[in-house]
Image: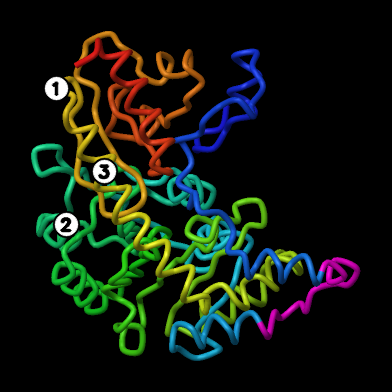
Amino acid sequence: MSEHGGNIVETGLRLGVDPALLLDFSANINPLGLPERIAALIADNLSVIERYPDVEYRHLHQALASANRCGYDQVIAGNGETELIYGLVRALKPRRAMLLVPGFAEYRRALRQQGCEIIEHRLDEDSDFQVTPRLLDAVREQKPDCLFIATPNNPTGQMPDAALLNALTDLCESMQIALIVDEAFIDFLPQGSALAARLPDARFLYLLRSLTKFFALPGLRLGYLLSSNVTTIRTLKATREPWSVNALAALAGEHLLTDEAYIARSHAFFARERAGLFQAMSQFAQLKVWRPAANFIFFRCLRPGLHLQDALLTRHILIRHCENYPGLDNTYYRVAVRSGRENERLIAALAEVLGGE
């Protein structure tokens, strides 16, 4: 079975129920759905699938560069952020890499494919899984070739302090360590990236972005990478498979980041619904809930012997278990923030399972 969220087909088959009947809290996708302007754009331009996309994706790259106020040669789009994780690791060829634990599984898979030694830096529950200055000490001591860090972290949802991120950037620059920052969920934070302003002067900084989650188009697959290391960007463009981004995804990507009305509406929606869901979940004594920064909530079930995912599946609600994340076990879970009515259904199911607290 897939180790990622959103796996409703396999789950439905395993349970013998129609996947359409499952309420999916396991995938962190914007419940507001695809922006109406983009849906109309796609509907009006279906004929683009009758032609090969521009192999250089000139219009898409220009749009992404403009939205991020960087040079055309500092950006590359990909078939989802995951394609770029694997491509970047192949291009950089690190021998020793540092990963924060827990963290997204694809970093480890990409590094292992290249035979790279992996150094783990564990985030402590006692520190609420937050990145601390201990990471700077570990980098100085271990001297990795590259470091992956997610801001905010997946699955914990914790956002590192901006000053610490800048200190980490300075350290990696001085030690010539590739700092690969996964900002897949950064669009859910109204303040945006703490490191985007460092792109012009940070040659070893790489910012990974996903358009799949915030703009609700996981079926199209679209992400991008920003870096002032134009040599690496050129290498990625020259060595990857042609036409990896389909024509509809490329068309959508040219317009997504300028849909200011949708972006503002989404930020207001998540500020409201995230606060309500966090408060409701925090009322359960048998749950330890961490305050989220993005569009999902990380928590721990404290009742011994209860597999909460299985218990909620009997009520046709799918949540994400986190036991396959290194450093976590089967007591940790993650849920997406959905609409108010859907969130209420989750809370009601939790009350039933946990004994009506």
Q: Secondary structure at mark 2?
A: helix
Over which residues does the magenta segment extend? 46-59
Tag shown at residue 285 = 1
Disc number placed over residue 73 in the picture, else none: none
Q: Magenta span has 58?
A: yes
Spatial CA distance of label 1 from label 2 is 32 Å
Is 230 on the left or on the right of 250, as rendered? left
Q: Nearer the viewer, residue 355 or 96?
A: 355
Q: Nearer the viewer, mark 1 or mark 2?
A: 1
Q: Badge 3: how crowded within 10 Å, few (<14), some, or many (20+)?
A: some
Within 10 Å of disc 1 (Cα), the crowding (few <14, some 14-19, many 20+) is few
What residue sits right under mark 2 in the picture?
135
Q: Is residue 102 above or below residue 316?
A: below
Q: Tag 2: residue type?
A: Leu
Q: Earlier in the sequence, mark 1 or mark 2?
A: 2
- Image point 32% across, 13% down: which residue? 353
Q: Quadrant of the N terminus?
A: top right
* Residue 276: numbered disc: 3
Does the magenta-highlighted stretch encompass residue 91? no
Q: CA distance from mark 3 to mark 2?
A: 33 Å
